[in-house]
Amino acid sequence: MTTSSKGNNSGLTRRHTLAMAGAGALVAGLGMRPAGAAPLATVRQGYQTNMWGMPTYYLLRSGLLEKHGVKFEEFAVPSGNLTMQQQVARQVDLGTYAGPSLCLGHDKGGLIAIAYIENVGKTARVMARKELGLTKVEQLKGLKVANQTGSSTGNIFSDQIATKAGLKKSDWQEVRMNTDDQAAALAAKTVDAMVTVEPYNQIAEDDGYANTIAEFYDFDKMPVFMAATPDFAEKNPETIVAYLKAWIDVSKDFKNSPDKVADLIFAYYASKGYTMSKATFTKALARVEVNPGSPADFGPYMQTQAEILLGEKKIKAIPDWKTVLRGDFFKQASA
């Protein structure tokens, strides 16, 4: 874990924030905890610094966790599969990522989903250097493709998108690279294509050096889940319910106060040295569909993802979805 520094684009930060619960108590009808209630556990929150993680970043900066009496520490990394690995190692309690990473996290560390947060299929694309004139995924044969190996986007690209285009893993040269480094590599012409997410795709498109050859949304809407370690969930159910109440408030802000949300998140990228325009950022953020809810309805979708991973021998078995997709916490938070 490292201390964040201005201008560091890696996103590998660990900022320790203890959001102190307000003095006194609010009535349960306002979503606040009554006086005399036992203190909630401190949440170690992991999130990725690409656009998938920005709803969580907004949660941490909005004051909504404080409103519900939740203390937190934050752990930022470039992509969700790294958060998943931190959870497997029990370094982080909660974190967001898509279905394939959830399957892997449950297989390796028993991780469970406590909420569905967003759809991000529109944020993920396969893009190529514009001067190459590529229009189809099958044209990547023999070319260098930047990919976040082990991530949900990486798995969906190699196991579904490339396969559907008739490409075997040996047909293209994978260049392992974090999502937030890929656009710069494409601009420098050290790779021919990239498999990454917003805002990096929109930056590459608006700066004129890349074009889209495939959109993930055409293959997968890519629901993103908030996952928890099973031990944290078992020991701290009240904390999780209060935490999810804050997420319900976040969804209201995304719907009713989009400018406030956009300004806060745009300031994050500006602080990291990104020079994208507000117009570029707004287009990138618009591709995230935030609508928190219960994960319990995603059994059929997750079954498909697990069968693909099992076929690739990336997981040992298909899990019991009633164990993995825990809808009870969000049901309580919504009551």
Image (cartoon, rainbow, N blue to C red):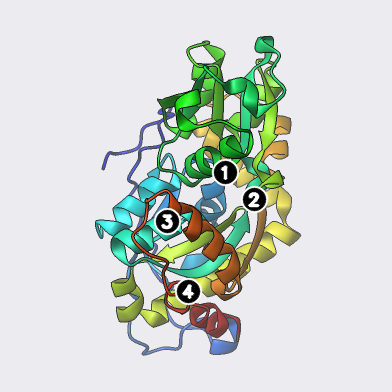
Q: Is residue 308 left or right of residue 117?
A: left
Q: Nearer the viewer, mark 1 or mark 4?
A: 1
Instruction: Name the N-terminal-most of marks 3 and 2.
Output: 2
Question: Dot 4 corresponds to which residue?
Answer: 321
Q: Is residue 276 left or right of residue 12?
A: right
The answer to whether residue 93 is seen in the rendering is no
For the residues labelled 2 and 4, say whether their Cβ atoms are less than 8 Å apart: no
Instruction: Name the N-terminal-most of marks 2 and 4.
Output: 2
Q: Which mark is residue 310?
A: 3
Q: Nearer the viewer, mark 3 or mark 2?
A: 3
Q: Nearer the viewer, mark 3 or mark 4?
A: 3
Label 4 is placed on what type of residue? Trp
Q: Which mark is residue 319?
A: none
Distance from disc 3 to disc 4, alpha carbons, whole Å, reads 15 Å
Query: Crowding at label 4, few (<14), some or many (≥20) Cα neighbours within 10 Å?
Result: some
Question: Dot 2 corresponds to which residue?
Answer: 220
Q: Quadrant of the C terminus?
A: bottom right
Question: Dot 1 corresponds to which residue?
Answer: 160
Label 3 is placed on what type of residue? Leu
Residue 201 found in image quarter: top right
Instruction: Name the N-terminal-most of marks 3 and 4.
Output: 3
Q: Is residue 208 left or right of residue 152?
A: right
Instruction: Name the N-terminal-most of marks 2 and 1.
Output: 1
Q: Residue placed at 48% from the left, 33% from the top?
A: 179
Distance from disc 2 to disc 4, alpha carbons, whole Å, reads 19 Å
Please state the horizontal and vertical placement of residue 322, each as a whole percent of the image: 47, 79
Please state the horizontal and vertical placement of residue 210, each as a whole percent of the image: 66, 19
Tag 4's secondary structure? helix
